[in-house]
Image (cartoon, rainbow, N blue to C red):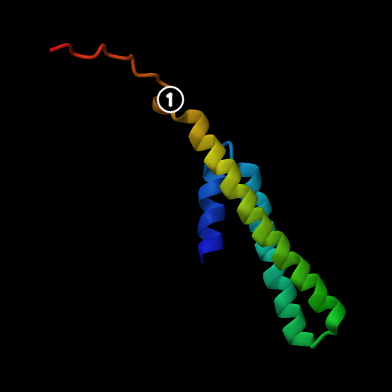
């Protein structure tokens, strides 16, 4: 459920749309391959493909997080503002 929610939120953002589509595609492919393995009791070669899809999905989640973080930093103008130094009060 979290992967689907992440993909939907990413697709709604213009900058993250491509990563959201990739994430949704990888998740759908993993689910379909899992169902195929279970229905037809396929061999270890297909299970290896399932593992590769799972690793790609987790990697895509990490990349999406990095891209989302960089988008947040790029739009956070308050972090770039400098505060003028105030002279020390002399007593």
Residue at horizontal 83 percent and vertical 77 percent from the top: 46
Asked whether, in this view, residue 53 is left or right of residue 7, the answer is: right
Residue located at (67% from left, 64% from top): 28
Picture coordinates of residue 16, whole percent (x, y): 59, 42
Residue depicted at x 27% and y 13%: 86
Q: Which residue is mark 1?
A: 77
Marker count (numbered): 1
Position of residue 59 relative to residue 53, above or below, is above
Task: Mark 1: give few (<14), some (14-19) or many (20+) Cα within 10 Å.
Answer: few
Residue 78 falls in image quadrant: top left
Write down the quadrant of residue 42 in the picture.
Answer: bottom right
- The answer to whether 70 is drawn above or below residue 30 in the figure is above
**Residue at point 26%, 11% (across, down):** 87
Residue 15 drawn at (x, y percent): 58, 36
Residue 71, percent across and down? 54, 36
Q: Considering depth in this image, is 25 or 57 the residue closer to the camera? A: 57
Q: Is residue 68 left or right of residue 91?
A: right
> Between 6 and 83, which is closer to the camera in this rendering?
83
- Residue that sits furthest to the left in the current view: 91
Residue lying furthest bottom: 41
């Amino acid at each position: 459920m979290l992967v689907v929610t992440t993909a939907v939120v990413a697709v709604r953002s213009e900058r993250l749309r491509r990563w959201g589509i990739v994430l949704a595609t990888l998740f759908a492919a993993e689910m379909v391959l899992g169902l195929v393995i279970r229905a037809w009791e396929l061999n270890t070669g297909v299970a290896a493909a399932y593992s590769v899809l799972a690793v790609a999905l987790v990697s895509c989640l990490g990349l999406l997080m990095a891209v989302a973080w960089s988008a947040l930093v790029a739009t956070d103008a308050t972090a770039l503002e400098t505060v003028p130094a105030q002279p020390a009060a002399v007593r």
